[in-house]
Image (tube, grey):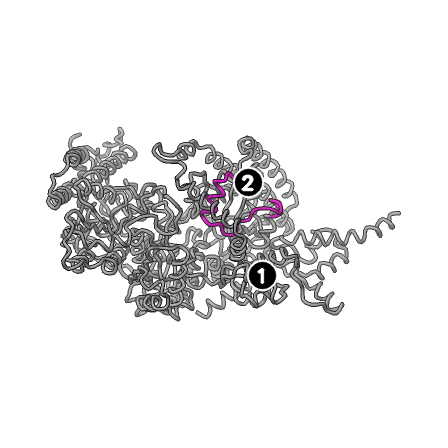
Amino acid sequence: MSSVSATIQEVFNEPGCAKNQNKSEAEKKKGCTKQLQPGGAAGGCAFDGAKIALQPLTDVAHLVHGPIACEGNSWDNRGAKSSGSQIWRTGFTTDINETDVVFGGEKRLFKSIKEIIEKYNPPAVFVYQTCVPAMIGDDIDAVCKAAKEKFGTPVIPVNSPGFVGPKNLGNKLAGEAILQHVIGTEEPEYTTPYDINIIGEYNLSGELWQVKPLLDELGIRILACISGDGRYKDVAASHRAKAAMMVCSKAMINVARKMEERYDIPFFEGSFYGIQDSSDSLREIARMLIERGADPELMDRTEAIIEREEARAWAAIAKYKPRFKDKKVLLITGGVKSWSVVAALQEAGLELVGTSVKKSTKEDKERIKELMGQDAHMIDDMTPREMYKMLKDAKADIMLSGGRSQFIALKAAMPWLDINQERHHAYMGYVGMVKLVEEIDKALYNPIWEQVRKPAPWDNPANNWQNRAIAEMEAEAAALAADPVAAEKARRSKKICNCKSVDLGTIEDAIAAHGLTTVEGVRTHTNASGGCGACSVRIEEIFEARGLVPAEEPELDPIAAEAKRRAKKVCNCKSVDVGAIEDAIHAGASNLADVKAQTKASSGCGGCAERIEEMLDAAASTSVPATLVAAE
Amino acid sequence: MAKFVQGKKACAVNPLKMSQPIGGALAFMGLRGAMPLLHGSQGCTSFGLVLFVRHFKEAIPLQTTAMSEVATVLGGLDNVEQAVLNIYNRTKPEIIGICSTGVTETKGDDVDGYIKLIRDKYPQLADFPMVYVSTPDFKGAFQDGWEKTVEKMVQVLVKKPEPDATPDPKRVNVLPGSHLSPGDLDELRTILEDFGLEPSFLPDLAGSLDGHIPDDFTPTTIGGISVQEVAAMGQASWTIAIGEQMRAAAEAMQKKTGIPYRLFERLCGLGPNDEFFMFLSEISGREVPRKYRRQRGQLVDAMLDAHFHLGGRKLAIGAEPDLLYDVASMLHEMGTHITTAVTTTQSPVFEKLPAEEVLLGDLEDLETLAKERGCDLLLTHSHGRQAAERLNIPFHRIGIPMFDRIGAGHRMIAGYRGTRELIFTLANLCIADHEANHEVTPDTWKNPWDGDGHGHSHAPAATPTHGSAVSTAHH
């Protein structure tokens, strides 16, 4: 297991992960080992995450080494699509029994691999470790190695047993497995200057095929998609791509970043959700390929296609705009990045009344604020009743969310649309955006709502459960309004840190009692943000609300202070600090592209581009007078 | 009659089986205000949760002790304690039902001991209903988890009646197996009530997972039998157990309360229902109501209409023992051959199954054997869809999970009416298959002696026998 823990540590130290960047050293060491709350957790495990990330590799046999629960209860449950082999949808498991638990399951695993290769002859077998064999000490790495030597087929161990952590961690451990055992192990038949990798895209509902025709038209080849509709050989040879696009950063950032480090494949973080995002991503792909040697005319063709596709999409969406006038959407999403969906819906003229930020990073939150205005109603953790009230108060006409919260909307007789993994429709690219709008329209205007909302003739409508729920909530609110003490108590009891179960009152008291000014201080005194660290943003907001800006360390001497100022990270992906960028500007860099070329800053996820623009502006404004003088 | 055969493969391909803990969890979901809790890593719960959500299309109460790697090694007392406290404080359940998993069984957590410690430590939990069942993932199957859980509920929750208490002649306990849907339970309840009986179902999924619009938001189960009603089951005069899997629970009931039981291995088919209705007539002292006499006639007519289509079909069925036995036996009575039967766990009912063998295996076995033996009707859960596509034979979903069609909770197999519905569905499926894949063309009999002879394995459906009879008719 030591190698698993080592890999986990490495994943936690991922410099490309914005979430980790927001953490202190101590937090980073702890990694993402968010302590799950017994009796209050509902997510998938690390094994689930690893399987989700790799299973869309369509020609691979995915073998789960464990008791029946791990595969038997969950197999063939993903909406990814394949253009060829269906073996990925075949459920393989060692289904270990009591005897295996006592004597070890390695022999059964080896035999299973043998049977799979004999019967199905896949180009590779992926073996997933689970909790029970991990506990009894089955060494899947050794078994995989032996099987590979014996049968000549690559057998890849994926060490991500469920109890090491949550789904998200499993995604990354899966990434490590292919980095270690797959990528770079084969060579492509040929290469072109137009070869790209797409990382973190799963081809759910076949959505990749909504975009691929455009790339085909441009002559851009997807050398490998990791992992949607992917082939083993393509992934094995993916290290020869010229550039990469990373679609879902949280899942596979380690793959993108390490491929850049090892094989010099630059990547950017992009999205094909929404029109603007699609265009930006196409442009970025073209730009990167040109930078890596493709013919610059590619950009002209790209622009032409963007113009044509945007015009088509807008024309199709324009028809819906009058129908969406004054319609409000409540968006609760984890999987698809909130901000990209927000932008997409606004393009269709819908008004957003809230969005979930549960899985968003600080940077995501900033982007949402930017798109929706400062007063965006961000919902961290609404209770079902609150969600219902929000829908009911006519604040929302439709709810868009993942499958789990759908019943709140449907039982409340409210239109609902699935936008997470389990959805049946594909929403990517220009056509996908039109499809999303079409589906929202269909849901909003379905005549069923009118009928299901009518009470039964013998019912007393004043006494149905919906009205009772509202009445209860109003009574609670009224009681609080009438009782300032209780209201204050309710305000103070709001949970800030979910991991360590710390409420607002405790934090406020600690701030007052110890004169705290930093998140670290709060952590020391209350333990808040000592878990996953996601609430550090909320703690900063408490400081802001109290008129305190989280303070830096006490004054340093001017030289040390300047050194500290210059050492501040601007670009987390490429680890570029203020000083390096300032030096580049001094040396003549006058725009973002120059800075990027000289320092590599903003060539990762691109999230720091704005910061760099600000630095350029600041530098330009100080030098303006000089330029004017020179001109005269 | 059927020989029970163990598969010899090391690797299960396309599992038919699901694990014990979630079978146990589903049984707990038939209690009102219940929160089932799986003692294991969070994935154990998450997979089960998703499975049930996709099957029932309902919100599913299911919690986890969220065992981490470290907690697993050190033992899960803290996690069980925290989980119980959190659930107790947050969701205010009437009962918490705990099932172990592979992880915690491998470690050997003594959950009964934990519960005792927790009760001692927290006075508010001293008498709070909590039931623990040992359900390791690496043993048995879904049905076994259900079986053990209902047995344990009877042992723990049912109160021993006072020695001088006289049983209430109207009250009847019903212990339904996991092969019955909420729709079946609703049907049975109506039937029993029509005999003037007052049934208590344990578990009662019809109250919780029948897909109704609830009266309020609740994080626990939204219906089902209450803990108090279970406690009072000792006052009944009879226990009716449905499915061989319920024998243990019925015996536990008898041992504790002295109530006699009658076990009905099947409730699908004409004969089993005749027995069932006559038994009800006997214990209630009432004649079978007109309504059911009429339903019996309808079933007989349906069987007559359908036998043209189902007779001679070769069935490939993959299901848990009681469901397999019930449905396959009914089809056998319709003239269908039980050519391939694959199941998940051992059961004594197979001795009575009119088939040569039952294989303990997976859907790969089912598919391979169905192909080898030329089966032309496939019955299993939704995961059989890929096999059905490859085999290109009519496919009907039975059992859990059924995630790619809606209304799983209301599909019936029990009673005269449930049987009638199932027969119509299957016959229509065969008719549609014939239209889509085996319509005769001018070429159908062109080379009747070549190989498999162009659709001869699916000769016109109205012809009870295949192949040669049809061909000879043309010569």
Label 1, on which residue?
A508
User: Taking A198 as reference, is A42 left or right?
Assistant: left
Q: Is residue A161 magenta?
A: no
Please determine whether, in this image, residue B441 is positioned above or below residue A632.
above
Give the mark nearest the N terminus, 1 or 2.
2
Q: Are marks 1 and 2 in contact (CB under 8 Å)?
A: no
Place residue B420 in its image quadrant.
top left
Task: Please provide percent x and percent y for residue B260.
Answer: 13, 54
Amino acid at circle 2? Leu
The region drawn magenta spans: A369-394
Secondary structure category for the residue under label 1? helix
Front position in the image: B86 or A490: A490
Dot 2 lies on which element? Answer: helix
Please tell me how crowded label 1 is: few (under 14), some (14-19), or many (20+) other residues with Cα within 10 Å.
some
Closer to the camera in the image, A179 or B426:
B426
User: Dividing the picture into quarters, in which one does residue A514 lie?
Assistant: bottom right
Residue situated furthest top in the rendering: B442
Specify the subunit that label 1 lies on.
Answer: A
Residue B115 x/y as whole percent: 33, 66
Check disc 2: other Cα within 10 Å, few if <14, some if 14-19, many if 20+: many
Which quadrant holds residue B453? Answer: top left
Q: Is residue B78 above or below residue A251?
A: below
Q: Amino acid at mark 1?
A: Glu
Residue A185 appearing in the image: no
Q: Residue at x 23, y 34 (%)?
A: B447
Judge left or right: residue B333 versus residue A550.
left
| Residue linked to disc 2 | A345
Which quadrant holds the C terminus of chain B?
top left
Foreground pick, B336 / A251: A251
Q: Nearer the viewer, mark 1 or mark 2?
A: 1
x%, y% of residue A474? Answer: 48, 45
